Image (spheres, rainbow, N blue to C red):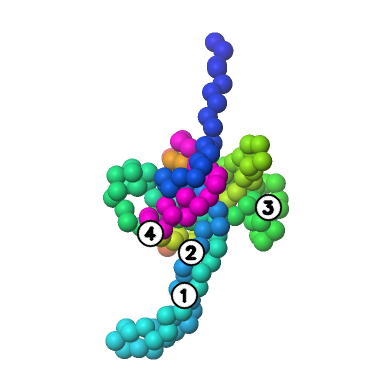
Amino acid sequence: MIMKEHNFDWYSLIQKSDDITQGDIILDCLVPVIGDVFYTELLKTNEGEVVNNEIDIIKLNAIILSQACDITNDKLDSIIICPIWTLKDLMATEKFYQSSDAREKLRQGLQPIYHLLNEYILNEFMFPFSVVDFRDVYTLPKTYLKAIAKTKDTRIRLLPPYREHLSQAFARYFMRVGLPVDISKEAIKNIK
């Protein structure tokens, strides 16, 4: 029996739309982040009053991780996003990933802190191999993200089943449990 190869596109192109969903990639997204001075001043006050409300604005490439059904059914006011780095940037900052063995582990999903996304090239639009970084999670108002999305002439959306695969990787990262004492390998090996 000959198996037919199926073609599952990784991405779709979205043009000039404020429609957002899980798997949408928003390039150059401005994200407010509470600065260190804010924390320091907050700790100095007894009533929890903010003495210095320093907020930094960072620009990053991000992917939407909130569930598509919650966004579609207006069950969320805030949307979860995580930053995306190009694989080349990751290789430049973390020398470990310069090794092809390390990149293979990343491809296989064996590096729980990151999730590898495929490249996408269509005409002049190019999205390189990229990595979702689960260490930093941000929430932004849905209306704000919709407004940013609408300003983009062209953006891409991760399609099923790849977006669900990303969601599963995100869940695996947060559900990890480190045990203080594990079961002994030797003890299990010697059972007869």
Magenta extent: 141-161
Question: How packed is label 2: few (under 14 Cα within 10 Å), some, or many (20 or more)?
Answer: some
Which tag, 4 or 1, sits closer to the chain's start? 1
Distance from Cα at disc 2 to Cα at disc 4: 11 Å
> For numbered disc 4, what is the local secondary structure?
strand
Which tag, 2 or 3, sits closer to the chain's start? 2
Tell me if 127 is positioned left or right of 163 in this view. Answer: right
> For numbered disc 2, what is the local secondary structure?
strand
Q: Which residue is mark 1?
A: 55
Task: Name the residue rendered at 41%, 58% in the picture.
Answer: 144
Q: Quadrant of the N terminus?
A: top right
Tell me if 47 is positioned left or right of 187 in this view. Answer: left
> Mark number for residue 121?
none
Task: Name the residue rendered at 50%, 73% in the picture.
Answer: 56
* Residue 43 location (% of width, % of height): 39, 85
Residue type highlighted by circle 4:
Pro
Q: Does residue 133 appear anywhere in the picture?
A: no
The reply to whether dot 4 and dot 1 touch (C-beta < 8 Å) is: no
The reply to whether dot 3 and dot 1 touch (C-beta < 8 Å) is: no
> Mark number for residue 141?
4
Residue type highlighted by circle 1:
Ile
Distance from Cα at disc 1 to Cα at disc 2: 10 Å
* Residue 72 location (% of width, % of height): 33, 44
> Mark number for residue 88?
3
Which tag, 3 or 1, sits closer to the chain's start? 1
Residue type highlighted by circle 3:
Lys
Question: How packed is label 3: few (under 14 Cα within 10 Å), some, or many (20 or more)?
Answer: some
Which tag, 2 or 4, sits closer to the chain's start? 2
Which callout, 3 or 1, points to the residue nearer the camera?
1
Q: Is residue 148 highlighted in magenta?
A: yes
Name of the residue lying farthest toward the top = 1
> Mark number for residue 31?
2
